[in-house]
Amino acid sequence: QVQLVESGGGLVQPGGSLRLSCAASGSIFSIYFMGWYRQAPGNQRELVAGITNGGSTNYADSVKGRFTISRDNAKNTVYLQMNSLKPEDTAVYYCNARNPINRHDYWGQGTQVTVSS
């Protein structure tokens, strides 16, 4: 079992920055693939960024060059640094942990990010 708690969302103006954090507990964090997803009203949940247990990363095309995912295994935490935010980045952002052995997914409760002037 893995429990995930996101923080760091909020209201920011276009062009601004936010850093999301996801604290994990309950299992061996370092083995999990971690990801950030988002869901805007009326849209399906989509992958924003992912990081493997080896540190390899991948990003949605819409956020490449603006967002950076990282992890600190000593703190059981994954981060999403979001720069040059756009109104279309507005969504609820969810942290995901995937067990690479049995591929079981765990989700946080989500944190709202609103980009508006």
Image: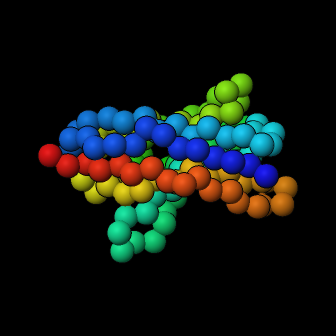
Q: Nearer the viewer, residue 10 or 97?
A: 10
Residue 37 vs residue 26, the one in the foreground:
26
Residue, x 76% and y 37% (percent of image)? Answer: 30
Count up the numbered dots. 0
Please, is residue 72 above or below residue 106 in the view?
Answer: above
Image side of residue 29 versus residue 10, left or right? right
Judged from this view, the residue extending furthest toward the right is 101
Is residue 61 among the parts visible in the rendering? no
Quadrant for residue 70, please give it.
top right
Residue farthest to the top? Answer: 74
Q: Residue 81's spot in the image, x, y percent?
A: 44, 35
Q: Name the residue rendered at 21%, 43% in the picture.
A: 14
Q: Which residue is rendered at x = 69% and y = 48% of the image?
A: 3
Looking at the image, residue 75 sits to the left or right of residue 101; the answer is left
Q: Quadrant of residue 105?
A: bottom right
Quick check: can you spot residue 4? yes
Q: In the image, what residue occupies the spot 28% across and 57% down?
A: 88
Query: How far from the left and from the top, in percent, is residue 6?
Result: 53, 44
Left of 29 or right of it: where is 83? Answer: left
Find the residue positioned furthest to the bottom. Answer: 42
- Residue at the limit of the structure toward the left, as seen here: 117
User: What colouring does the structure picture have?
Assistant: rainbow
Q: For this rendering, which residue is in front, 6 or 50?
A: 6
Question: Residue 13, how many percent across, how many down?
Answer: 21, 41
Residue 117 image position (x, y, % from top left): 14, 46
